[in-house]
Amino acid sequence: MKRLSTFLIYALLILGSLVMFFPFVWMFLTSLKPFAEIFELKVWPQAPTLDNYREVLFKTQFPRWFLNSLIVAGITTLSVLFFDSLVGYALAKLRFPGKGLIFVLILSTLMVPTEMLVIPWYVMSTEYGWSNTYWGLLFPGVISAFGVFLMRQFFETLPTDLLDAGRIDGLSEFGVFWRIAFPLVRPALAALGIFTFLGNWNAFLWPLIVVQTADMRTIPVGVALFSSEAGTAWNLIMAASSLAVLPVLLVFLFFQRQIIEGVVLTGVKG
């Protein structure tokens, strides 16, 4: 019975893996098909070609969209890692009036849907001239309430005596944070960085609203515009999507341990 249960568990895991992996295989194989073959009921391309990739890379602005997504996701991730850890440290290890209320107010913002924030964000971007700029794409995500919560919970586990020793040695409060506390929360930083990067890499609604010109589009917005009233260029969509998923796959392959730790941290540290 034990062997049978083990076999059934592995069989279900393998089946689930195949179900999850098949769309990626289908997307890649479709990207190698000429447009005429896409609607045929054949998974494997009959006449594989790289023309779709050549058209995406050299006849569209996909390289610029890729760069825009990389800039937005990278800068936002660095900003979130620094500011969220700084706020989390202050809420966890410093004493000041209203600390608990501030933390509750920050957490309460998690209950506000993004769709409700789009209008004030857009009004602010228009009034200050941030529309169609990198800062306009960046500013909604430079700090996150979830990141503050995660870092605060993790900083709570650090021994206060260790931080006091740094203060006795003459470190400033920021020095204690930067030299002692910050390096000790690297697992939480890695998990937060991965989640933030992936979230901003795949962001669609806000870039669609704030961007007006083709050269400022990010990948999700640019790829979506391959579909129009005149028709849908599925061959270009599949080729562009195959290229766009590469950074996500690399992040997962190199940081899958931190992703798992992040899932555990969000469940245990709370």
Image (cartoon, rainbow, N blue to C red):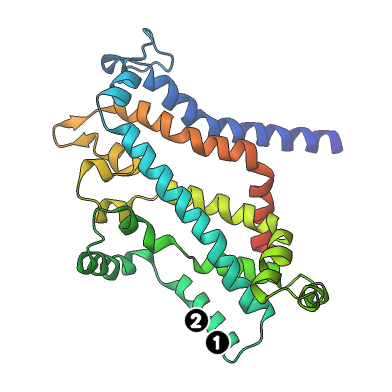
> Within the image, what quadrant is residue 88 found in?
bottom right
Instruction: Tell me which residue sits at (34%, 57%) in the image.
Output: 135
Instruction: Tell me which residue sits at (59%, 69%) in the image.
Output: 86
Give the crowd class for mark 1: few <14, some 14-19, many >=20 residues within 10 Å.
few
Task: Decide: is 200 above or below 107.
Answer: above
Q: Looking at the image, which residue sits at the far left? A: 230
Which sits in the foreground, 267 or 262?
Answer: 262
Q: Looking at the image, which residue sits at the far bottom? A: 97
Q: Which residue is mark 1?
A: 101
Q: Secondary structure at mark 2?
A: helix
Q: Which residue is mark 2?
A: 105
User: Left or right: where does residue 202 sit relative to residue 232?
Assistant: right
User: Left or right: where does residue 107 sit relative to residue 61?
Assistant: right
**Relative image position of residue 57 (x, y in whole percent):** 32, 25
Q: CA distance from mark 2 to mark 1?
A: 6 Å
**Relative image position of residue 142 (x, y in whole percent):** 44, 62
Q: Secondary structure at mark 1?
A: helix
At label 2, the amino acid type is Leu
For the C terminus, the quadrant is: bottom right
Which sits in the foreground, 197 or 132?
Answer: 132
Q: Looking at the image, can residue 1 be seen?
A: no
For the N terminus, the quadrant is: top right
Q: Looking at the image, which residue sits at the far right? A: 2
> Mark 2 and 1 residues: CB-CB less than 8 Å, in contact?
yes
Task: Decide: is 67 above or below 264.
Answer: above
> Within the image, what quadrant is residue 109 found in?
bottom left
